[in-house]
Image: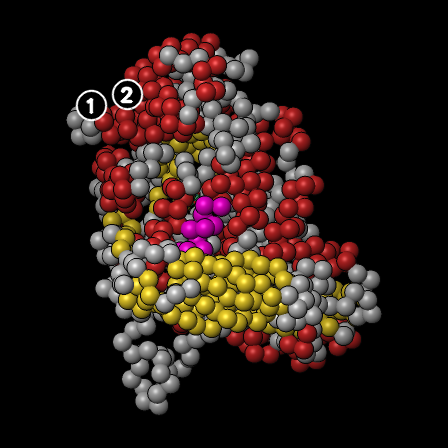
Amino acid sequence: MHNSTSVKIISCLSILLMLVGCDNSEKNKITIQNKDNIINQKVDSLLALMTLEEKVGQMNMYNGFWEVTGPVPKEGNAKTKYEHLKKGWVGGMLNVRGVENVKKVQQIAVEETRLGIPLIIGFDVIHGFKTINPIPLAEAASWDLEAIEKSARIAAIEASAAGINWTFAPMVDISRDPRWGRVMEGAGEDPYLGSKIAKARVKGFQGDDLTKANTIAACAKHFAAYGFTEAGKEYNTVDIGASTLYNSVLPPFKAATESGVRTFMNSFNDLNGVPVTASKFLQRDILKTEWNFDGFVVSDWASIYELINWGRAKDEKEAAKIASKAGSDMDMEGNIYITELANLVKEGTVDIAVINEAVSRILRVKFQLGLFDDPYKYCNLKNEKENIGTKLHQEEALDIAKKSMVLLKNENNLLPLKKEGQHIALIGPLAAEKNSPLGNWRLAADDNSAVSVLEGMQAYSKNILNHKKGVNLIEGNTTFFHKVKINTTNKNGIKEAVLAAKKADIVVMVLGEHGFQSGESRSRTRLDLPGLQQELLESVFAVNKNIVLVLNTGRPLAITWAAKHIPSIIVGWQLGSQTGNAVAEVLYGDYNPSGKLPMTFPKSVGQIPIYYNHKNTGRPDNNASNVFWSHYIDEANSPLYPFGFGLSYTNFTYKNLKVKGSNFFINATVNVSVDVSNSGNIKGKEVVQLYIRDVVASIVRPVRELKGFNLTTLNVGETKTIQFELTKAQLGFYTNKGVFIIEPGDFEVYVGGNSDAKLKTTFNLE
Ligand code: NOJ
């Protein structure tokens, strides 16, 4: 135990240890089950010592005194917060970072309160901490679970070194709507890929042992269905059916619980009329009962208070009652529980059992984090100095950044660029950007700390590189808190850019969205290149057609004109600290692109929601000359680029798709194999994807569903046989009552390099 820890906590803990009858030497021998039992006993013992107010205090979470990530509520002034901290009326804090700052608040909780219960310290460690990794949507495009886990691990190492013990990640919201700004924070549209990534990220943050000083508690958010916000508008209503809820929305959350995620966050939306913060169905019936989740649920920022705005609660008192009964355990910066709950218990409106349960859950996580053994275990100045922003972390950030890029088009093999003898014009408002590539969730990063594409390319080759901005994307500076102002008037730089393009062999254009155009509360109605960039692109194209477009974006964009005219397009998302180095390495061919889209790119906004795993409908596309089928009269049904799509500098061919057998008993394992060859001229990595279709079912199944994928590296001319296993878990589905079933009948299997794969076989379950 740390020297400065108060006498109070020492005596409190020794009472607890006496109560559970366990000393340190015995501890080493005990099994995980026993460990859980011991923690539960410690929780019960501590709970028995607590007053009602102290219990409610554990359910209260305040924003710190330094930075905010939401609207500041009227009551939330610093003076009250300090007073509450001193009384032991605060269970957790967010947005406190840095060893000195964390120590300041932890010391108050541990050394100045009656029971000395340590705080849990949360922060949005979403895609890195100081070393910024690619935005999560970009990482999902790598389909590389090992790399994704590593990225989360590094984020946890840095955050924990800065005093943080809890991240509000992973966001596992499935979304089919790129208008919604938060698609940048998730893994895209598919529940199978989303579930695998949820597990990888939880594992990365939490590691194998939560008591270690470099692991932190993860948080699966936002529970649930936030990604289906109507019209992609932030904080909007959600109205979806049971089949979508059970089969698309919930699986990644369930996967997170299976990998031991310690906390959940609810969300701002309602679900079919019930604000989810008030949803007993989601929080108690599904999460805590059916899935047996024993961690705690934190509200989203003031979402308990917002029950009043929704029209679900008439005042703060009712909001506190409804949310606590529904299973929201901790109130994030809402000031509702701390002011209302104790009275509600005293007057008999809320049962003390509700409070005891919530507090037990919160304390359990604190014990599991080892905070009672050493509340300052995350407050080590040496660790902070040595483990943040290290060279190794930067190298890992570069590694996953390369893996996240997706090549959409490469006509005439414009890419890779030649390392010498090419005259390159580098054009676009994002080419020299050092801030935008850091993306949206980057509060702990230094502003302008990313390697720009210009810097990356300058360092990479001796080619003549003539850089021209062309146009500004935004006006003035922008931050996490403010709306970006897009430049729609100043075109002064276009002429210069066109002149540079005229003289060049190849033009590399870095266009797209600013990092602060996606993320929370950054919904868009248009999905074009913002501002004057389309005009810039067309002006350059008029004088030089050899354009490589590096598309920076936090969401799928409807770049239909570019897809038709520009010969080479590569998605460079917001790739974090190492952006420029990653882009240069890929453009110059030292890394052969291997990313695949985790979300469909639409042709136009009117196609949204557009997703590969849609239903067939009663009148599917049949190329009929009449109009009576499911389509638009002014746009095709097909997307611009489908889910799972991504090219390489080499070619892959698929052959010999086989199912071992053709008729199976319902619970059998179905073995599928396919031969994949590298038929091009350079070594490459392919994401081999397997999709199924359950042809006839009691609940209509999608035309395709991803049920397996395999990353494989192939040398030139090499062929590998890739094996997949399909079990009940992949072949079944949820009924509208949430029961998982598997039904006999015909199944189709498709394997290939994207969701439009043509190679097909079938089998039957009986
Ligand atoms: C609101 C966001 O919805 C949530 O994802 C985030 O973790 C909290 N603010 C805390 O910053």
Can you give x and y, in whole percent of width and height, for residue 678 in the image? 62, 68
Q: Which residue is mark 2?
A: 52
Residue plotted at (64% across, 65% down): 718
Give the residue pinned by disc 1: 346
- On the question of residue 723 being in view, the answer is yes
Which region shows up in magenta? 189-200
The answer to which of marks 1 and 2 sits earlier in the sequence is 2
Label 2: which secondary element = helix
Q: Is residue 375 left or right of residue 634?
A: right
Residue 85 point in image, percent of width and height? 42, 23
Figure quarter occupied by ligand 1: top left
Q: Is residue 190 magenta?
A: yes
**Principal SS element in the magenta part?**
helix
Query: Tag 1: Cα neighbours inside 10 Å, few (<14), some, or many (≥20)?
Result: few
Using a 10 Å C-alpha cutoff, classify the residue at mark 2 as few (fewer than 14 neighbours), some (14 to 19) or many (20 or more): some
Residue 339 falls within the magenta-colored stretch: no
Question: Residue, x 51% and y 36% (percent of image)?
Answer: 207
The reply to whether the C-beta atoms of the residues labelled 1 and 2 are less than 8 Å apart is yes
Q: Is residue 522 left or right of residue 736?
A: right
Q: Residue 584: percent from the left, percent from the top?
A: 71, 59
Q: Residue 408 appears in which quarter of the rendering? A: bottom right
Asked if 674 appears above or below 741 in the picture, the reply is below
> Helix, strand or loop at disc 1?
helix
Could one spot residue 179 in this view of the protein? no
Q: In whole angstroms, how far apart are the C-alphas of marks 1 and 2?
A: 9 Å
Residue 427 higher or lower than 334, as above or below:
below
Q: Is residue 568 above or below residue 344?
A: below
Residue at the spot 49% in from the left edge and 31% down from the top edge: 209
Residue 234, position as x, y percentages in the image: 39, 55
> Is residue 153 or residue 449 the one in the foreground?
153
